[in-house]
Image (cartoon, rainbow, N blue to C red):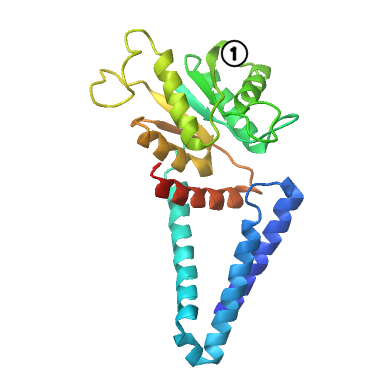
Amino acid sequence: MLIWVLLTGALLCLIYFIVIVAYAGIGTSYVFLWLLFAGVFAVTAGLVSRCQRYPEYARLRPAVSFLTLCSAGVIIMLILQILIFYRIPETAEPDLEYLIVLGSRVKEDGPGRTLKRRLDKAAEYVAENPDTMLILSGGQERGEPESEAVVMREYLVSNGVPASQMILEDQSTNTMENIMFSRELIEQNRSPETAGQEIVREGFVRPPRIGVLTSNYHLFRAMKIAQKQGIFDVSGIAASSDPVLLVHMSVRDALAILKERLLGHL
């Protein structure tokens, strides 16, 4: 039974890889993970089959170590998925002073699918909260026509959001820099009475009310990084994700959480 479950897993990973390539292109970041997962499932199925046929093989240290490692990996991934999707805010906190909108890949003709969903959510929020200042965060990566922040502003302006309600952060290349550089812009932009104060809980008469808007699968990591950066009372706003790419993005972000944890970013 276990062998068939593993082989089914390998087949599903292979099929999902083909679906992603057909839907979003071979250039989708980390798409080859699914070929790796398919290979791991297939090799694990082979080892289990061999252990069942030859009990003495099950006592060999390399086989036991590989099977233990694969089992631990599956458990860790399940735990991370629970953390990612547990307690995603159902409603957005109103009347935030600043809302950091995290960028994503842009194309020649404008924002990609993921970024459009984030920007539509941002436009919806400021329509209901007109005093909120948007921090559009995202630099220009290789292959992008302009910085993500500039493309984000153009899209929002075309959808009726005043340019005066936006501050551009166009230097960041990853989530940690998104939060760090946006935090610095907020400090610079605050009123003269509070401009020199840190965004920390201690010693603040009234900390600025700051939110982070990003995709639902990315929100947990972004908020943890924000808290690590000193924005303790950050509010999260989740944009919906492309249903076809949701599994891929959530798995990719789980791996990113492990990396950020090892680097001490959260």
Residue nearest the viewer, comparing 119 with 49: 49
Answer few, some or many: residues within 10 Å of disc 1's Cα (few below 14, many 20 plus, some between 14 and 19). few
Label 1: element kind: helix
Residue 256 is situated, as x and y percent measured from the top left of the image, at 50, 48
Relative to 102, is 192 above or below? above
Number of callouts: 1
Please give the residue where the numbered disc 1 appears in the rendered image: 163
Name the residue type under label 1. Ala
| Residue at x 53% of width, y 88% of height | 52
Residue nearest the viewer, comparing 74 with 162: 74
Relative to 246, is 168 above or below? above
Residue 99 is situated, as x and y percent measured from the top left of the image, at 47, 24
Residue 40 is situated, as x and y percent measured from the top left of the image, at 59, 69
| Residue at x 40% of width, y 13% of height | 190
- Say whether residue 124 is visible: yes
Left-right relation of 29 to 252: right
Residue 186 is situated, as x and y percent measured from the top left of the image, at 43, 19
Please state, as top left, top right, bottom left or bottom right, where the N terminus lies in the image: bottom right
Left-right relation of 229 to 169: left
Left-right relation of 56 to 21: left
Residue nearest the viewer, comparing 119 with 68: 68
Asked which quadrant contains residue 94, the reply is top left
